[in-house]
Amino acid sequence: MNKKKGIISLILMAVVIIFLGFTTAVGFGKTGTGAMRNIKLGLDLAGGVSITYQVEDENPTAEQMSDTIYKLQLRVEQYSTEASVYQEGDDRISIEIPGVTDANQILDELGKPGSLEFQTSDGESVITGADVQTASVQSGQDDMGNAEYSVELVLNDEGTQKFADATEANIGQPISIIYDGETISSPTVQSAITGGTAYITGNFTYEEADNLASTIRIGGLQLELKELRSNVVGAQLGEEAISTSLMAGAIGFGLVFIFMICVYYLPGLAAGIALVIYTELVLVILNAFNVTLTLPGIAGIVLSIGMAVDANVIIFARVREEMARGKSIKNALKAGFQKAMSAIIDGNVTTLIAAAVLWFMGSGTVKGFAQTLAIGIVVSMFTALVITRIIVFAFYAVGLRGEKLYYHPKKERQPIDFIGKKKYFFTLSIAVMLIGLGVLGYNYSQGRGAFAYGLEFEGGTSTTVDFDKDYTINEIDQEIVPVVEEVTGDNNVQTQKVEGSNQVIIKTVALDLDQREALNQALVDNFQVDADTITAENISSTVSSEMRQDAVVAVLTAAVFMLLYIWLRFKDIRFATSAVLALLHDVVVVILFYAVSRIAIGNTFIACILTIVGYSINATIVIFDRIREELRYQTRSTDLKLLVNKSVTETLTRSIYTNLTTFIMVAVLYILGVSSIREFALPLIVGIVWGAYSSVCITAALWYVMKTKIGGKKTAGKGKK
């Protein structure tokens, strides 16, 4: 790159920053398309629609209620991955959908859940809605090239067999779809359908096909429901919660920016500028993909800023190594980017695999987290490998070539004997886990439960109160919530304001009769409400057992796919096995921290654990990449122990700096954030600190033990000189 191109590149970067900054701050057109204010916000930040259904069937079983809740959860995720469905009382189901304000529109689109039946022309029932797993619109083209739409039905195992028998016996005859006694479609059977997937074709418009698919989906519930009430509810958290979180993000970003410049000089400035573009791009993409952003989501974005530093640290650490070996600045920059490429790609692709698996297999919060994670990974790779590179080479091209701008010579660090201390590290890890398990067992034996479950996991009591004035969200937080906390002993009270009324919905842990009466009396004494208007219902968890199972299966599947990828890339199953073992080790420690600290396990717990999964595997890949590189250039006589120690020592600066920058972001969130953010930030801090220890002290040691104990010698093996 010559001087002219360097100037043009810097001007282009400035234009990009200004353009993206204008887009996120102001947007375009009357509606401000692309502006940060138009990002869809969750119930906790902006409110949404709350709908309660009454089960029409008498004495519904727990299994029927659970199945209906789970299927409704999957359906309302078309509006938002952060939507929640839970049981209220014995025979009611409530749905909360963030980011929308028109309850009637939702009710019309969702449809009235009713009975669905497929019947032959003589009236014989073939299958019911319970046999239909999914119904969706499929698009294609006819012989003339025009768009045509059909409805794809996927049946369960029992429905597949029944439908196969019926279609085989009724070829050329219609099978009618009956919804609440009304025929909504009568497709003719063209051939026997034995594979469990059927297509309803016709001259459908997209809207007609979509309505038919929606009706079939909603009729696939085990229970019939009728609308009991619908409300537009306000945000659960006040403006103060949002402003303090954003302030924490700005302060953390500023500290990381300064840190990068202080440590890496001119390249650190380039990385800081790239981080500005990274943040702006993420906000624009959140808009473009209509991602619902919750308060933990804001924390996740702030956290991702810290994680985005990682690629830059890997690159600049490599550049310094090359300069220390006597290379010119230009050649050192080229070699730094080139040698860092494999670690950056492997680390991010591994995490991206996890995000993809979580997206396809997870539900609810897991799916939402995967979407945000994938966006962060892709944008991070782009800004580090493209934007940072353009900026730093442009700096060099315009004449900023003094060696002191890039590197200050330091004494070469001698390899630290990490492998020699592996027994101490393994003992410490085992001891920490045993202590955690001991505390968990003690709490369980004392009747306090192994974990402190929040509303999302254990359910609780929902109390609706009519106050004599219209309280603002901040007033609810400052005046009402402290009273509720004192009476109930619950430090994670959730509140929702019903728009257009003085009603406030208060959600707490499950309250017995005495506690309910005490709460009612406290509300009467402090706010002069009418006790007769206070209503309370038990509510189920918003994270159903099926959703928990989905999350566990998704995480385990993601671990398997990550193992396979690492095995493929490193061509050694021991790299993959030790990486996954270290990852599980980190996750277990964080879970045990929840048990010991008694921090409530809710939706932020899922986000926290998944963050640790993505973060820990990335750190491990960097060390393994260096070991793989050293193995290529060692002779048969080289001591494997020394090689591993050297690799860990050479990546130690990266490990410290990356974890420190991420720690800074999360620590600022913890200090300035509201209580719900602090309960998310504290376990993350533990995960970051323990993950740093694990990646440096445990991961490579595990690989070394496997390498020397399973069919290997304590030498590096034959390689290139």
Image: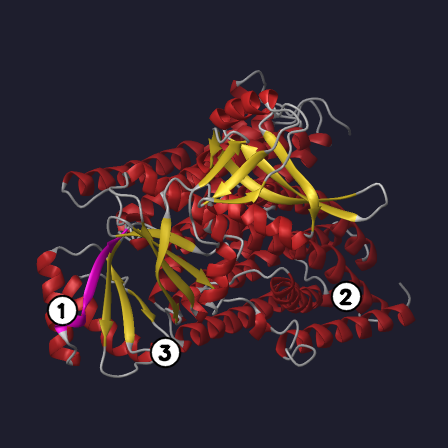
Image spot of residue 484 (x, y percent): 20, 68
Q: Which residue is mark 1?
A: 520
Q: What numbered label is drawn on residue 500? A: 3
Find the distance from the CA under tag 1 to the CA under tag 2.
Answer: 62 Å
Q: Amino acid at mark 2?
A: Ile
Q: Which residues are magenta?
A: 531-539
Q: Quadrant of the N terminus?
A: bottom right
Membership of 537 in magenta stretch: yes
Picture quadrant where residue 438 is located: top left
Q: Nearer the viewer, mark 1 or mark 3?
A: 3
Image spot of residue 307 (x, y percent): 56, 56
Q: Nearer the viewer, residue 708 or 81?
A: 81
Q: What numbered label is drawn on residue 702? A: none
Q: Is residue 611 visible?
A: no
Q: Residues within 10 Å of mark 2 (few under 14, many from 20)?
A: many
Q: What numbered label is drawn on residue 391? A: 2
Q: Amino acid at mark 3?
A: Gly
Image spot of residue 359 (x, y percent): 55, 45
Image point (39%, 52%), residue name:
85
Find the distance from the CA under tag 3 to the CA under tag 2.
Answer: 52 Å
Report the side of 79 relative to 270 (left or right): left
Image point (78%, 56%), residue name:
333
Q: Amino acid at mark 1?
A: Asn
Image point (69%, 72%), residue name:
20
Find the distance from the CA under tag 1 to the CA under tag 3.
Answer: 23 Å
Report the side of 230 relative to 409 (left or right): left
Q: Nearer the viewer, mark 3 or mark 2?
A: 3
**The furthest residue to the left:** 514
**The furthest residue to the bottom:** 469
Q: Nearer the viewer, residue 528 or 510?
A: 528
